[in-house]
Image (cartoon, grey):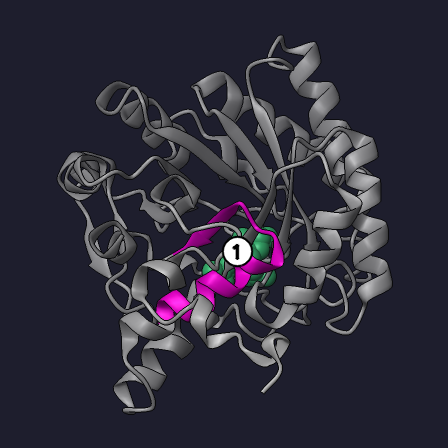
Amino acid sequence: MDISSILQGGYQHPVSRSWQAKQQLTKSMLMYPIFITDDPDARVEVPSLPGQCRWGVNRLEEFLGPLVQKGLQSVILFGVPLKCLKDMRGTPADDPNGPVISAVKKLRSLFPDLYIACDVCLCEYTDHGHCGYLNADGTIDNTPSVARIAEVAVNYAKAGAHCVAPSDMMDGRVKAIKRGLIDAGFGNKCTLMSYSAKFASSLYGPFRDAAGSAPSFGNRKCYQLPVAARGLARRAILRDMEEGADIIMVKPALPYLDIIADAGQLAVDHPIACYQVSGEFAMVHAGAAAGVYDLKTMAFESVESMVRAGATLIMTYFTPDFLDWL
Ligand SMILES: NCC[C@H](CC(=O)O)[C@@H](CN)CCC(=O)O
Ligand SMILES: [Zn+2]
């Protein structure tokens, strides 16, 4: 046999196999999405998201303390207000006493080294459940939506967030947020992580259950990207880079590894993030429960594919598990 035919000698041992990955998954690459509700003492399990809960601010130390001890380095907050009065502009989004701003302040004091990102969107706070303002005909009214998203982002930065992450997909929101952060004196203090290539995926269901954020009518196909739209994703990534995004995110992740790879080539000097969304997480659990594969093995296989595609920051609900497994 020709010498060039022999590859197995390079990975016959677990140690030499570990060297074959260009980048290893590490704890610092994991950002944990967490749900904060407006009952301060709540701990409410989310049936469609195995092991995940909606937490009240008074329970955050009990929830995150052990994870911080195991090496948790970053979280991204999602507000789940159940007692607020939702309206067409998403007024509760930046309520100074609301779940997100209260949690940012609490976490900053509890865990000074924890990196705190805030998802910025209106869908959890609008009475219609869309991510922006609506025109009378039900279409997105982009300009006022962008102004409101920027206002919410700046208020999260003022509350102490290290990062704001607009998941709304309104056109031009990155530039508006960046301008707002600069004008408020946070341009050099708060990271802007943009959900640049975010697709109108069918994999958001469990999240919408958890957050109560499903649109009351229609869908998000006029502002989230068409699932087959590689060109639009590339254009959105380039646009957000130009508008001042510090981190570029692709979402969902596993069905979009090609987009993650594209992002790494287009935004070669930016960190590339990806979000293993709720439906992906539920799928991995469902397959394991059905006996198709071992849960831990599949969790690693799915997330390591995102690392291989070029992601250096991964939002995943498996974060607590990986803190034990890594
Ligand atoms: N701002 C929209 C929320 C959005 C998807 C959606 O409901 O359209 C995601 C949160 N950023 C869902 C994330 C997930 O499914 O885990
Ligand atoms: Zn939204």
Residue 186 in which image quadrant? top right
The secondary structure type at the circle numbered 1 is helix
In the image, residue 199 lies at what x, y percent? 68, 64
Q: What's the residue type where badge 1 is placed?
A: Val
Give the residue at x 61% y 59%: 309
Q: Which residue is mark 1?
A: 307
State yes or no: residue 295 in magenta. no
Can residue 209 be seen? no
In the image, residue 194 lies at what x, y percent? 65, 41
Give the residue at x 32% y 85%: 293
Residue range (magenta): 299-316
Q: Main secondary structure of the magenta part?
A: helix
Give the residue at x 38% y 46%: 26
Rendered view: 109 above or below 322? above
Number of residues whose C-alpha sits closer than 10 Å to that of mark 1, classed few (under 14), some (14–19) or many (20 or more): many
Q: Furthest-top residue in view?
A: 185
Rendered view: 8 above or below 241? below
Q: Nearer the viewer, residue 79 or 165?
A: 165
